[in-house]
């Protein structure tokens, strides 16, 4: 009989200790250690541990597979884009997001589509089969008379051994686990969702995917900080990590890839939550600018790169006299440190009286901008609000702002300008190019500036 002992494990990084610690010495987080009862390694691990391996080394040229044609296609274009072109057989995908954001809805839509091409097993540890069927009925088109596919199998189960038994008996081509925090290994004496259970269950699913070629999707809960609950080792074990982001009070949802072994990292897919589920937005730039008020002071258009896709978003700035000694700096969709940097440059290099002004910045549509290419649009929106003068309505702003007030070039300029021209913008204010041999798209005038002051003179409507 296996011996049981007590240990303390950090819920953030998985580091074990003999006693509870106030602060984890590895990740630096406070109050993350919990007590766990842990048994010795299961007998199945001890058996056959003489160093023998079932796999033999093979020359790389003789290994089968690896072709892009092996991907399973998806008609949900935005989801396929984020995955890198489709579902890769044998891949392990982890998708996280806030409660109620639409993770289960998106994967149920995917399961219903893939069931037309093969058997799909949907394992739920949180909902009953009747609840999932009600959602599936709602996701069907209102004019569809086609019954739900018989090849989509539902089961409510949290026991890992039972789940693997269902997989063996049904032999699906796609497995969805909703969610990984509810699954437990009965051979481990700790509760479901603990660090040990998450690590062991994820490793078993990884072995299943790699040995059988079964594509596995894991839904993961997130912490209050917005990261997937459990040790960071969980993200290292899977092939792809996706985050479904957005405000539950807004209709747009962003599916972002933060890790992808089969496609571009930081790729983003845009969806809209409607009555029939998650509907993809094929042209998100147009959707983000649909309700824009032309010739309004404090509004600028930035062109940001999300993965390989350029997106046009509206950046709004608002300044008002501060009623307190310390003026506020509040940003929605932008990094707060970047906002502080831009306001400091505007105050020192351009002489704007922001020391007595509250500054508010908002990125329309719920998108979060992380790249410096939006610095110029952010600065222009704030300056436009201070001067109460609108920017040119047919112009986009691209460029990074330095501490000396200089403008610096950003990558992917032709792709950004092509997207702006496709949406009808006539000019672009950007840093002076170092490489004059770049092929820029026709139909859009490029207006170059070396400093932030020059750029604002070009951007302000005359």
Image (cartoon, rainbow, N blue to C red):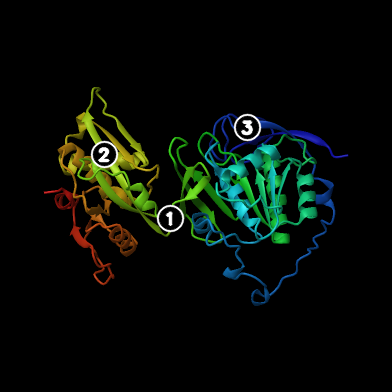
Separation of residues labelled 3 and 1 (CA atoms)? 44 Å
Mark 2 / mark 1, whichever is N-terminal: 1
Between marks 3 and 1 in the image, the one whose residue lies nearer the viewer:
1
Q: Does dot 1 land on a helix, a strand or a loop? A: loop
Number of numbered discs visible in the structure rendering:
3
Q: Does dot 2 land on a helix, a strand or a loop? A: strand
Residue 406: percent from the left, percent from the top? 21, 52
Q: Does dot 3 land on a helix, a strand or a loop? A: strand
Quadrant where the N terminus sits is top right
Please report the residue visible at 61 percent of the width from the left and 69 percent of the height from the top.
Answer: 66
Above or below 296: residue 443: below
Taking the image as shown, residue 392 lies to the left or right of residue 331, namely left
Q: Residue furthest top?
A: 324
Residue 23: percent from the left, percent from the top? 56, 32
Taking the image as shown, residue 339 lies to the left or right of residue 71, namely left
List the residue tagged with mark 3: 33
Between marks 2 and 3 in the image, the one whose residue lies nearer the viewer:
2
Query: Tag 1: Cα neighbours inside 10 Å, few (<14), some, or many (≥20)?
Result: some
List the residue tagged with mark 2: 317
Nearer to me, 65 or 434: 65
List the residue tagged with mark 1: 282
Separation of residues labelled 2 and 3 (CA atoms)? 43 Å
Please report the residue visible at 45 percent of the width from the left and 38 percent of the height from the top.
Answer: 247
Query: Tag 2: Cα neighbours inside 10 Å, few (<14), some, or many (≥20)?
Result: many
Separation of residues labelled 2 and 1 (CA atoms)? 28 Å
Query: Pointer 2 and pointer 1: residues touching (CB < 8 Å)?
Result: no
Q: Is residue 110 visible?
A: yes
Taking the image as shown, residue 325 lies to the left or right of residue 37, namely left
């Amino acid at each position: 009989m296996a011996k049981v002992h007590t240990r303390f494990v950090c819920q953030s990084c998985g580091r074990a200790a003999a006693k509870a610690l106030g602060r984890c010495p590895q990740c630096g987080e406070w109050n993350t250690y919990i007590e766990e009862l842990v048994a010795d390694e299961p007998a199945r691990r001890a058996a056959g541990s003489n160093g023998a391996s079932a796999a033999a080394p093979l020359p790389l040229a003789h290994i089968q597979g690896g072709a892009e044609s092996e991907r399973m296609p998806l008609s949900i274009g935005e989801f396929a884009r984020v995955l890198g072109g489709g579902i890769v057989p044998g891949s392990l995908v982890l998708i996280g997001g806030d409660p109620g954001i639409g993770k289960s809805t998106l994967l149920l839509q995917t399961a219903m589509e893939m069931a037309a091409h093969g058997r799909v097993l949907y394992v739920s540890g949180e909902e009953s089969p009747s609840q999932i069927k009600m959602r599936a009925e709602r996701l069907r088109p209102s004019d569809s008379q086609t019954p739900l596919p018989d090849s989509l199998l539902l089961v409510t189960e949290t026991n890992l051994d039972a789940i693997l038994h269902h997989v063996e008996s049904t032999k699906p081509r796609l497995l969805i686990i909703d969610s990984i925090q509810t699954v437990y290994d009965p051979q481990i004496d700790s509760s479901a969702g603990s660090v040990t259970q998450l690590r062991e269950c994820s490793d078993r699913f990884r072995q299943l995917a790699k040995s059988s070629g079964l594509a596995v999707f894991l839904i993961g809960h997130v912490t209050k900080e917005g990261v997937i609950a459990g040790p960071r080792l969980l993200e290292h074990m899977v092939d792809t990590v996706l985050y479904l982001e957005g405000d539950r009070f807004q209709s747009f949802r962003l599916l972002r890839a933060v890790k992808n072994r089969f496609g571009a990292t930081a790729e983003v897919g845009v969806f809209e939550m409607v009555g029939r589920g998650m509907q993809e937005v094929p042209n998100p730039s147009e959707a983000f600018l649909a309700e824009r008020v032309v010739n309004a002071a404090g509004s600028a258009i930035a062109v940001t790169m999300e993965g390989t896709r350029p997106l046009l978003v509206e950046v709004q700035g608002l300044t008002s006299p501060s009623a307190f000694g310390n003026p506020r700096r509040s940003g929605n969709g932008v990094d707060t440190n970047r906002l502080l940097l831009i306001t400091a440059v505007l105050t020192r290099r351009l002489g704007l009286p922001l020391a007595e002004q509250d500054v508010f910045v908002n990125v329309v549509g719920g998108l979060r901008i992380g790249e410096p290419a939006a610095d110029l649009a952010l600065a222009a929106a704030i300056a436009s609000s201070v001067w109460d003068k609108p920017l040119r309505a047919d112009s986009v702003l691209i460029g990074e702002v330095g501490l000396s007030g200089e403008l610096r070039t950003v990558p992917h300029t032709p792709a950004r300008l092509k997207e702006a021209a496709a949406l009808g913008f006539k000019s672009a204010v950007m840093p002076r190019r170092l490489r004059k041999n770049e092929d820029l798209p026709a139909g859009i005038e490029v207006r170059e500036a070396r400093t932030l002051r020059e750029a604002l003179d070009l951007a302000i409507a005359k």
